[in-house]
Amino acid sequence: MKVIKTATTLAALLFFDCGTAFSQQVGNHLNYYPDARDKLFWPHMYPDGGETFYCELPFSGMEVQNAKTAPVNGERKRIWVEHVYASSWIEQAKESACNDAHKGICEGAGDLHNLWPALRSTNQRRSNHPFGNIAGESKQAFPSYCDDFEFYNEMVEPRDDVKGDVARSILYMMEAYDLPLPKQMKFSLLMKWHRQDPPDAHELWRRDAIFGLQGTDNAWLR
Ligand SMILES: [Ca+2]
Ligand SMILES: [Ca+2]
């Protein structure tokens, strides 16, 4: 972790001439998810909104009560932060190294390479279920507003366009924090999704933005 902290501090000085306060935020966030969410993820990666991870719905920039929202059947729904390598998986693997894990204080819990903006409904349905391929296309969880988010038999199959993104977040977390392959998931499936859905411009933009914010690269995006 020493290397990461050194690079992080350097990146903070290079990219943001904001002095000590900012570099302290960056230094703390990898192991403290609330800081990652509130001080880096929303204000520096998605200040003007973006697209939700699973449903590809456009969401707004910061609105009242710091909420970001996306249009869903005429309403605006809250956007939450999705841990692709589930935070509970980190807690289970790193129990002895976690300090108050339920508050998001755990090694790697705030690593931006693993965090994506997602509708609250998809975040909650996914929960900490594994990802996989579900036979056919009929198990859509939110057919009225999400084109391809399948849920069946305690498993999630995301849309094809983010299967590689999912795989690379998980592979990165396994390597960066010595975390195990998630239960009920196969390494061969992660590699297959990695190959089938190579990094696109958006994922490469995220890689660069995250390198600027936390000073660590995701080698699966090279
Ligand atoms: Ca399917
Ligand atoms: Ca993709």
Image: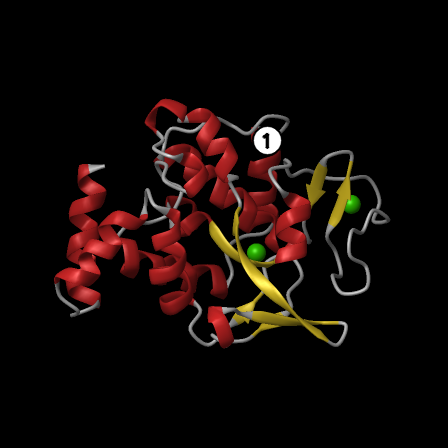
Asked if 52 appears above or below 162 in the picture, the reply is below
Viewer can see residue 87:
yes
Between 50 and 206, the one lying in front of the other is 50
Quadrant for ligand 1 reads top right
The x and y percentages for residue 184 are 64, 26
| Colouring scheme applied when the structure was drawn | secondary structure
Type of the residue with mark 1: Ser
- The residue that appears at 16% across and 64% down in the rendered structure is 14
Q: Quadrant of residue 46?
A: bottom left
- The residue that appears at 67% across and 49% down in the rendered structure is 158
Horizontal relation, residue 94 to residue 130: left or right? left
The x and y percentages for residue 37 are 41, 57
Viewer can see residue 208:
no
Between 88 and 212, the one lying in front of the other is 88
Q: Quadrant of residue 172?
A: top left
- The residue that appears at 75% across and 77% down in the rendered structure is 74
Within 10 Å of disc 1 (Cα), the crowding (few <14, some 14-19, many 20+) is: few
Asked if 149 appears above or below 194 in the picture, the reply is below
SS under mark 1: helix
Horizontal relation, residue 216 to residue 88: left or right? left
**Tag 1 residue:** 188
From this viewpoint, which residue is outermost toward the front?
Answer: 65
The x and y percentages for residue 221 are 42, 50
Asked if 113 appears above or below 185 in the picture, the reply is below
